[in-house]
Image (cartoon, helix red, strand yellow):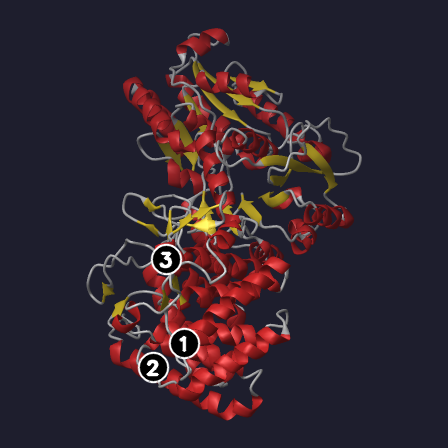
Amino acid sequence: MPDNKPTIVFLSTYPPRECGIATFTQDLLKYSQKIPGFGFRYKVAAFNLSPLDTYKYPKEVEWEIDENNKNDYIELAKTINNDHNISGVILQHEYGIFGGIEGEKILYFMENCKKPIVVTLHTALPKPSTKMYDVTERIIHYARQVVVLTRNSKEIIEGLYPNAYGKIFIIPHGIHPVEFSYQEEYKKKLELENKIVLSTFGLLSRNKGIKYVLKSLPEVIKKYPSILYLIIGETHPVIRRKEGEKYRLELAQLIKTLGLKKHVKFYDQYLSLPDLLEFLKATDIYISTSINPNQAVSGTLSYALGTGRPVVSTEFNQAKEIVTPDVGKLVPIQDYHAMKTALIEMLESPEKLKDMSRSAYEKTRPMVWGNVAEKYTNLLARTIIPPLNLRHLFEMTDRVGLFQFAHLTTPNRLTGYTLDDNARALVVCCKIAETANSKKIKGLIKTYLSFMKKCQRENGLFTNYIGFKDNLPTLQNKIEDLSDSHFRTLWALGVAMTSKTVSSKIRNDAKKMFLLFTKNAHDPEHLRARAFAIKAYSLALKQLPDQRNILMSQMKKYADSLIIALKKNSYKKWVWFEKDLNYGNAVLPESLLIAGKMLNDRSYTIKGIESLNFLIAKTFTPDMYMPIGQSHWYKNRLKRSQFDQQPEDPAAMIQALVCAYRFTGDDKYKNLANKCFSWFLGNNSLNKFMYDKSTGGCYDGLHPDRVNLNQGAESLISYIMSSITMSKTH
């Protein structure tokens, strides 16, 4: 049988090419394959310096890309687009591994790839060149999500690139799982007994700053004559192509000049991982030597701390974040006097050095590759929009309409039907029909519109609750205010009568129902009903040109009433239409944005954006969307409600954010819509999926300690609407 697991493609350099990014990618892929529950397959597109490179790649490498060949990038994008099993891409980005100025040729791939791309930015410079800024800005624009490896990198990227807002995630550099140990066993194995071992490893290049370590050693050796400094790693292949071993020979001459021949040893080879870890385990102090203050991350520093080794490090970005006094010392870049002092101070206290070892090991456990791979896998699962599964929608619908509630996945027939849910269902089916107008979808559209006809009384107004056994209105209709459901229904009719993919009969029936309602309806009291009226009238303008003046006048009246409510209830930092935040909040600013566009009145747009930004500030954390809980409403100046979170809230927010993105072109709103949608896919306060991929349903709510496992109509339609909206946005 064919393997239909969703496939993720890694774009990167890859071993046996000697490159830090290559090793990173191989480790990430290896450990990602071990994460249970997601079922992803992984393939690799490996980048080569030129067509002359003839690496013997492992089986996971399916494509080899010449980094300088534009067509290779474009053809790879087309291949990925056309492979239905490929769900997404992880791009490991470093400017030097892609062709063109500042690696600009990767943009040929990104602008042509239609699958979601997660980009890991391994470099984040606070003062990029104009060209680098332009390339990076476009990379961030095309990426669905962006991973950085440190808090400092996040601050730099968000500060420089406005289109990064809402799409940055921090996932640290991975380290290998090793048991904690002290040095003696490995010194003996490597014939380094009775030595104080200092080490630096990595591909050798001038930005390593090795010469400053060498200059610091003579005075340290006077005090500790058993010191041996190991320089582990071959010359970087790119450097070797340009100048051969010139830099290593310069270091060798400096060693001779300083009289260090007995105290410094080169290991001029690309060590296997087991060999490298043994050298690190034999190390008393690891020296991280970068002379680039803006270096975002160092895999070598991460590995050293991960094996429980104290460090002396120059003050580059990652080091300033993770080298705290309990694991080592920071020294100014190129300051060999400071390095000398740091080494002596650390060697003077063997017991403190042991404490540093233990502390370095314990603090780096979250960086173990298994944990890092799990974070990437979760991010992918929350980024990739699952294929639309309508199984639960069909099961929840009978010949009458869509049932209101479910017990787990089974329709709770005795609770009957609501106009609200069937109106929502009509909207989503009209949207689905734009790309998949099957007989089954046509049947659902007919069913839902027929139900709405059944609910419309002779005076044009609607009944909301219909019983199951007798299909008659229930007593609940006399208890509740139905204005919200009336005008949400009007919006649904507006969608149906303007849909180009439904039959003319459906459009005409929807139009007649729309006109009958508007002929007799009174102005709604509730703000959300007015908001839905604005949405409905904005659609009807296309089909009812003879009603244009009346519809425009009504839109203006309702938009003005929202502005009045906003002024009345706003107070200092509370910029909202009511004294609390309750359900479906985002439809209010969304309707003002629509009114601003349709009425060509910028004042509505400004207030719509202001109120939407206020709502964003109240509901988004740096990592996730936090819907207003319905256990109690969030009142101004009181503690906000966290639970019961319900799917209708993120669905409304997604509609508003996508509306803001389309009207303003500001990537911020699209990024936040992606983050909001990920609430359904586990990026929430319990890290639980709200979407059930086996049924296509959506759970009814998120409580402090559990998920409400019932899959009712409102939750189901909220998810489908959100999925369709996000799919059309990308």
Of labels 3 and 1, earlier in sequence is: 1
Specify few, some or many for label 3: CA neighbours under 10 Å numbering under 14, 14-19, or 20 or more.
some
Mark 2, secondary structure of its residue: loop
Read off the residue under disc 1. Answer: 487
Q: Which image quarter: residue 546?
A: bottom right
Q: Residue furthest front?
A: 470
Q: Are marks 2 and 1 in contact (CB under 8 Å)?
A: yes
Residue in the image at 44% along x and 20% along y: 178
Percent x, y for residue 620?
37, 57
| Furthest residue in direction left, as rendered | 638
Q: Disc 2 to disc 1, how far (Cα)?
A: 8 Å
Q: Quadrant of the N terminus?
A: top right
Picture coordinates of residue 616, whole percent (x, y) = 37, 63
The residue type indicated by label 1 comes to Phe
Q: Are marks 2 and 3 in contact (CB under 8 Å)?
A: no
Q: Is residue 288 left or right of residue 137?
A: left
Q: Residues within 10 Å of mark 1 (few under 14, many from 20)?
A: many
Which residue is labeled 3 in the image? 620
Q: SS at mark 3? A: loop
When asked about the image quadrant of residue 179, the answer is top left
Of pointers 2 and 3, the one earlier in the residue sequence: 2
Is 688 on the left-hand or right-hand side of 567?
Answer: right
Q: Is residue 101 above or below residue 584?
A: above
Of residues 100 and 217, the one drawn nearer to the viewer in this rendering: 100
Q: Return the disc, 2 or 1, that comes first in the chain's sequence.
A: 1
- The mark found on residue 524 in the picture is 2
Picture quarter with the C terminus = bottom right
Residue 93 visible at all: no
How far apart marks 2 and 3 lie (CA) works out to 31 Å
Give the vertical position of 568 relative to 279 (above or below): below
